[in-house]
Amino acid sequence: MDWRAVKFDWNKARAFLVTAEEGSLSAAARALGMAQPTLGRQVDGLEQELGVVLFERVGRGLTLTPSGLELLDHVRDMGDAAGRVSLTALGQSQALEGTISISASETYATVLLPPLVAKLRQQEPGIHVEIVVANHASDLLRREADIAIRNFRPTEPDLIAKKIGMADAILYATPQYIEKIGAPTTPYALRNADFVNMDRTGGMLKGLNSLGLGLTEANFPLLTESYLVMWELVKQGAAIGILDAHIGDAEPKVQRVLPDLEPLTFPIWLVSHREVTTSRRIRRVFDFLAEELKR
């Protein structure tokens, strides 16, 4: 098929692209922040418009058909081209007016960003702010956001990044839960405690055991990909959770577990596209966030 002769609905094409990259409808729906049935209808609609089958089901995942593989490169080119057009238009804008999108994880978007955005709006009422809540890394090159707060340094050459500092990840639980497990005073004493798992790959288990906790998979009876759900479970006394100390220490319902335990540390990076920093309003927001987050 000559894909160049086909007129695409970009929403459907983007649904196809993200599904192909994520490998399943559920993962793609999470990445795009939409309901899985809605995403499925967009992919089905694209298949009907083109008259081809793009995916085959393999177990719980999806694999591309030959037609899907052929289409994938063209849709990627479309996404890159759309991103370049949008970036160029934004880069040429010199007004301190318009919309800026900021991507952050659930906890940062819920706790850290609202007071900063309120302060920014007082200083720059012409700037409208869209907060993109994403626990995955938003694709700045495809304009999923203008600015992102991340815990890792980007590797893409077209992105610029500024390291804001380091943060401590601390273990928290309610006083009642700490008393329930015997008020432990050593890392090894937590070997019978329950934890909320945030990582299917075993990285959290490995990280905590590096601190001498001696945990196994049996210590993680609760699993969620949502930081807000994890934090609510901790506040309800269901288990121990780990969170940025700036957020955890401000919650009166919980306290640090083993206050003298060495924390896990992670960096905080502010990331944007190299071209969009030529826009005065995006530069203004980038510098504002960099200054405020340092505090």
Image (cartoon, rainbow, N blue to C red):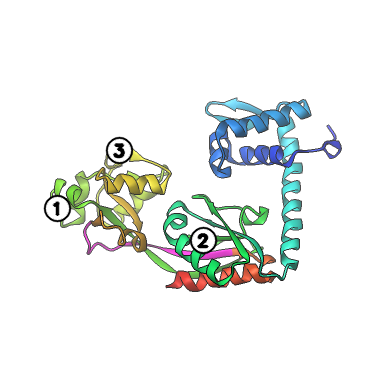
Residue 207 at what x, y percent from top left?
A: 35, 54
Say which residue label 1 marks.
183
Q: CA gap, disc 1 to disc 2?
A: 36 Å
Amino acid type, mark 1: Ala
> Is the C-beta separation of discs 2 and 3 under 8 Å?
no
In this view, the mark in front (2 or 3): 2
Q: Is residue 250 left or right of residue 13?
A: left
Amino acid type, mark 3: Pro
Q: Residue at x 46, y 69 (%)?
A: 293
Residues drawn in magenta? 257-271
Q: Is residue 118 left or right of residue 139?
A: left
Q: CA gap, disc 2 to disc 3?
A: 30 Å
Give the residue at the far left of this rendering: 182
- Ranked by sequence position, the earlier of labels 1 and 2 is 2
Magenta-span inclusion, residue 263 = yes
| Relative to 66, residue 171 above or below | below
Residue 190 at what x, y percent from top left?
A: 21, 50
Say which residue label 2 marks.
149
Q: Quadrant of residue 212?
A: bottom left
> Could you say which is closer to the camera, residue 147 or residue 3?
147
Say which residue label 3 marks.
221
Query: Is disc 1 placed on a helix, strand or loop?
Result: loop
Looking at the rendering, in which quadrant would you find the C terminus?
A: bottom left
Q: Quadrant of residue 273?
A: bottom right
> Could you say which is closer to the camera, residue 67 or residue 259?
259
| Relative to 278, residue 190 above or below | above
- Ranked by sequence position, the earlier of labels 2 and 3 is 2
Query: Is disc 3 placed on a helix, strand or loop?
Result: loop
Badge 3 density bin: few <14, some 14–19, many ≥20, Cα 10 Å = few
Q: Residue at x 45, y 72 (%)?
A: 294
